[in-house]
Amino acid sequence: MYLGKVIGTVVASHKYAGLTGVKLLVVEPLDHHQKPAGDAHVAVDATFQAGPNDLVTLVGSREAALALPETFVPVDAAIVGIVDQVHVERARR
C-alpha cells in the first residue's frame, strides 16, 4: 500500500468490460512526507469517490485486481482509500 495524489483523469472511449463505470485517474506516488516518489501512473478508483487533488492510498499488482467489484480485471494500481490526514513522528536519533 502506498500514498499518492490524484493529478488528473483519463477518458477512455473503450475499456475492458469489467471496468465499465470505473474512473481512471492519474496518480503521482508520494513518500511518507508527501513528496513525489516516482512516476505518475493510471489507477482505477475502487472507492468511486476520489477526484483531483485528493490524497489517496493505493494498492498494486494482484491486490489492485481484487479491489473492484469484478475481480481479476487487468489493472496494475487501484485507489482503495481517500486520506484525511497523515502524521509521521520524527525519527529518533
Image: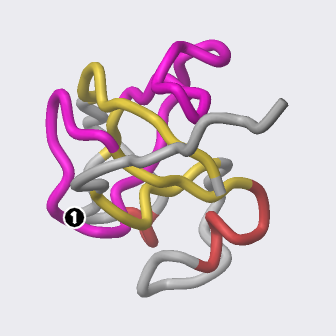
Location of residue 61 in the rendering, given as x and y in whole percent from the top left corner: 77, 57
Q: Which residues are magenta?
A: 26-55
Query: Magenta segment, principal secondary structure?
Result: loop
Residue 77 as seen in the image, left or right of residue 26:
right
Quarter occupied by residue 91: top right
Quarter occupied by residue 80: bottom left
Q: Residue at x 43, y 29 (%)?
A: 27
Q: Residue at x 52, y 26 (%)?
A: 33
Quarter occupied by residue 47: bottom left
Q: Quadrant of the N terminus?
A: bottom right
Q: Residue at x 28, y 51 (%)?
A: 85
Pick the residue in front: 92 or 15. Answer: 92
Outermost right residue:
93
The colour scheme used to paint the residues is: secondary structure
Asked if residue 83 is among those painted magenta in the image, a careful observer would answer: no
Pick the residue in front: 30 or 46. Answer: 30
Residue 91 as seen in the image, left or right of residue 6:
right
Which residue is under mark 1? Answer: 21
Residue 58 as seen in the image, left or right of residue 13:
right
The three-letter code of the residue at mark 1 reads: Gly
Residue 64 as seen in the image, left or right of residue 46:
right
Location of residue 51 in the rendering, given as x and y in whole percent from the top left corner: 15, 41
Circle 1 sits in a helix, a strand or a loop, which is it? Answer: loop
Number of labels in the image equals 1
Pick the residue in front: 73 or 51. Answer: 51
Indicate whether 56 appears above or below 30. Answer: below
Q: Quadrant of the C terminus?
A: top right
